[in-house]
């Protein structure tokens, strides 16, 4: 059965390469065009107050709507035998709750709503970006940097509020030899302020790279004519990988947030 399905898919791909091959094949690949931010109404004149509504605005709003539909509408029944929507919502809730509890500790559970919101927004934005002709808002450093800075400022303020000057113990490695402690303190301080940079670039870079690779293979498919099935197969493989990356990057961003939260609550080495 698996062999039959494989050859059937291969036949469809080959047939599509023959039927939809361009009359004048040419190599024209512009993988970064898909990340261009464009106004939805005219040349930027369609505004809501001081703001210009762009494709990024639209897809971020759609991500928020998707979250509301899943977590609020999908689970409003509170059924003992849950529907599919309620099951997914409960799984997401339990997954993030366990992550916060295991990584940051039980005293961090009070911050669970914010971390859950962060995880779901990134997850929905990533998955919506996999829809053909859509826009991936998390591929832009402008979005991921704001998210990372929110986390950075919050955990820093929380660290000083909870621990006072004792929060600086995060940078003082008391277990190291005394002569090395000042050097390690400088290194720890630099690495701390680099956190929002690595936090944001990791997410935006991985999402952007995957989409650019798919666009490159799509350009090859348009240029190869009857042999377009080769890049189409590659696109299918990369797309499957991107589905996994969409979840993993949301998970990595969230678990790093939990790690930073733990440092704020328990700063001593």
Image (cartoon, rainbow, N blue to C red):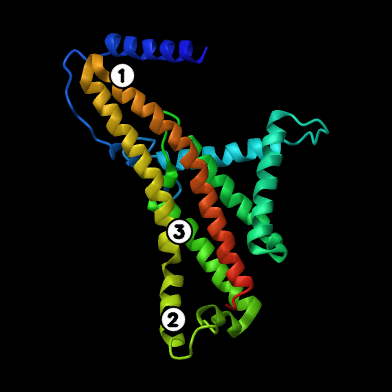
Secondary structure, mark 1, is: helix
Percent x, y of residue 266: 63, 73
Residue 12 lies in what quarter of the image? top left
Query: Residue pushed farthest bottom?
Result: 179
Density class for disc 3 (Cα within 10 Å; few <14, some 14-19, many ≥20) is: many
Disc number placed over residue 127 in the picture, else none: none
Q: Earlier in the sequence, mark 1 or mark 3?
A: 3
Q: Earlier in the sequence, mark 3 or mark 2?
A: 2
Disc number placed over residue 199 in the picture, else none: 3
- From the viewer's perspective, tell me whether residue 104 is left or right of residue 174: right
Say which quadrant the C terminus sits in.
bottom right
Disc number placed over residue 229 in the picture, else none: 1
**Distance from the alpha carbon under mark 3 to that under mark 2:** 22 Å
Disc number placed over residue 184 in the picture, else none: 2
- Of residue 66 and residue 245, the one placed in the foreground of this image is 245
Mark 1 or 3: in front is 1
Percent x, y of residue 49: 46, 48
Q: Earlier in the sequence, mark 1 or mark 2?
A: 2
Secondary structure, mark 2, is: helix
């Amino acid at each position: 059965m698996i062999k039959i399905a494989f050859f059937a898919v291969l036949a469809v791909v080959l047939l599509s390469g023959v039927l939809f091959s361009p009359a004048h094949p040419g190599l024209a690949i512009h993988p970064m065009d898909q990340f261009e931010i464009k106004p939805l109404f005219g040349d930027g004149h369609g505004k809501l107050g001081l703001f210009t509504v762009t494709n990024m605005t639209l897809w971020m709003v759609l991500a928020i709507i998707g979250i509301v539909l899943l977590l609020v509408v999908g689970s409003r029944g509170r059924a003992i035998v849950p529907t599919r929507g309620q099951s997914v919502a409960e799984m997401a809730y339990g997954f993030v709750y366990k992550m916060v509890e295991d990584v940051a500790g039980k005293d961090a559970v009070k911050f669970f709503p914010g971390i859950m919101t962060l995880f779901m927004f990134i997850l929905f934005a990533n998955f919506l970006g996999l829809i053909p002709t859509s826009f991936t808002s998390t591929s832009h450093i402008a979005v991921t940097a704001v998210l990372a800075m929110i986390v950075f400022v919050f955990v820093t303020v929380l660290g000083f509020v909870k621990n006072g000057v004792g929060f600086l113990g995060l940078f003082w490695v008391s277990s190291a030899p005394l002569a090395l402690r000042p050097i390690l303190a400088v290194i720890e301080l630099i690495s701390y302020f680099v956190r929002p940079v690595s936090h944001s670039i990791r997410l935006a870079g991985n999402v952007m790279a995957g989409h650019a690779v798919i666009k490159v293979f799509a350009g090859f498919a348009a240029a190869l004519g009857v042999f377009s099935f080769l890049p189409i197969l590659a696109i299918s493989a990369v797309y499957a990988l991107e589905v996994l990356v969409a979840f993993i990057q949301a998970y990595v961003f969230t678990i790093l947030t939990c790690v930073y939260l733990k440092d704020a609550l328990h700063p001593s080495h």
